[in-house]
Amino acid sequence: MPVLILLLVFVWATGGWWLLGYGAVLGWLYWLRLRGWKLGLAALLLWLAVTAAVHRWPEGAFARAVQWPSPVLLWLLAVTLIGLAAWSLLRLAHRHSVALPQQGPGLVPVKQAVSEAPPVPVNGTGSPADAELDRYARHIVLRELGGPGQAALRRARVLVVGAGGLGAPVCLYLAAAGVGRITVADDDRVGLSNLQRQVIFRTADADRLKAEAARDAMLALNPHVAVTALDRRITAEDAALLAGHDLVIDGTDSFAARQAVNAACVAVGVPLVAGSIAQWEGQLTVWDPARGAPCMACIFPEAPAAGLAPACAEAGVVGPLPGVIGSMMALEAIKLIAGAGEPLRGRMLIFDGLYSENRLMKISRRADCPVCGSGHLPPG
Ligand SMILES: [Zn+2]
C-alpha cells in the first residue's frame, strides 16, 4: 500500500497519468501468464510505442487520450480494478471451498477407489481430530490439497514394493503425509551396507526383516496410519492383493521383479509409480495403461542384456540419489491420490545427479505391447 501511494504521488507530481494505464496493461499481460524477459520486452516495446506516438502526433487523438482525465484511461483503470476485485474474491472463495480441483486425465477411477475404502481406525491417544489437524496443517493450507486432499490421503491404500533405497523415503513420506493404509512388501533383511542410503533403518535394525523394520519406523513417525508388513516378494500372481490398493509404488531393483509388479498392476488397472536408480542417475514415471499412459512393457519390452543394467550392489549408488528419486515418487503418489497437478503419466523424468541435470521424455503406449496391448488390457 505505501508503494501504491508513493506511485500515485509520483504520477500526480509528474503529470504522467498515462503511467497508470501503462501499469494496468502490464498487469493484464502478467495475468495472461507473460513472465520474465517476455514481460520485460513487452513493457519496453509498449513504452517505446506510447512515447513514439505522443512524440510523433503531439496534438493527435492518442496524445489527448493518454492525458488525465480521459475516458479511455478511466475505463482502463475501472476494468482493471473490477478484474482485480473479482480475482481476489475468487481466490478467497477457492480457499474456503470444499471441493478440490478434479481435473487431470483419468483421475476419477483412483479417487473413486479411494472414496470406497473404509475409514482408517485411529490408534493414537488424546484428541485424534485436533492432533491430526495440527500434524497436517502445512498440507491443509495448500490450495491443491486442503482438507479434502488430506481426507483422500487418509482413505488411500498404497502398496510399496521394496523397502530399499527408494522404498525408504517413499515409506517415510507417505506415513508422514498421513496415507491411511500402507502395505510394505520386502523379503530382504537389513544389512550394514544398506544404511548408507536406506534412511528408514537404524544401525540397531541390522539383520531385521526390512518390511517389519520399515513398518515400525512408519508407526513411530505417525501413529495415525495403519501399516501392514509383508515379508515376501510381489509376483505376477498377486493381482488380488494389488486390487485391494489404490496405487502401487515400485522401488525394487531387478528387471524381473519390476516386470512382475507391472504385469500384476496392468491386470487389475491400478496405477504404478515406478522409479529406478544406478550410480548417479535416476528416473521415474507413472505406468498407467488403464488411463492412457504406457506400461513398463510398452517402453522396456525385454530385459536388458546382462551387465547393461547392473544392480546397485555391483554398480554402486550415491547415498542421496534414492532420497531424491524416492521423494519424487512419494510426491507423485500424493498428487495421484489427491488429484493435484499433473502426474508423470506418459512422461519420464530422468535426473542426472552428477551434472545436476533434469530431462523430461514423452513416452507413449504401444498397441502391440505384450502386457497392455489390445487384447491384453482388462475392461474398464
Ligand atoms: Zn504396455
Image (spheres, rainbow, N blue to C red):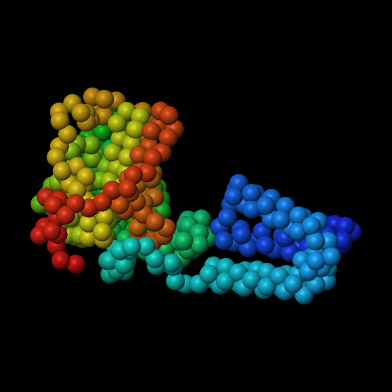
Query: Which quadrant holds residue 245?
Result: bottom left
Q: Residue at x 37, y 62 (%)?
A: 104
Q: Residue at x 31, y 53 (%)?
A: 345
Q: Residue at x 15, y 66 (%)?
A: 379
Query: Which quadrant holds residue 181?
Result: bottom left
- Left or right: 111 in relation to 257: right
Quadrant (top left, top right, bottom left, bottom right) of the C terminus: bottom left
- Whether residue 178 is visible, yes or no, is no
Query: Which quadrant holds residue 195?
Result: top left
Residue 6 location, x and y as percent?
83, 57
- Is residue 217 placed above or below 15 in the rendered structure? above
Residue 207 location, x and y as percent?
24, 32
Q: Depth check: 375 or 72 in front?
A: 72
Residue 202 location, x and y as percent?
35, 34
Residue 90 location, x and y as percent?
57, 71
Quadrant (top left, top right, bottom left, bottom right) of the N terminus: bottom right
Q: Residue at x 23, y 24 (%)?
A: 314
Q: Depth check: 82 or 178 in front?
A: 82
- Left or right: 363 in relation to 268: right
Toward the right, the furthest residue is: 13
- Whether residue 247 is visible, yes or no, is yes
- Left or right: 64 in relation to 130: right
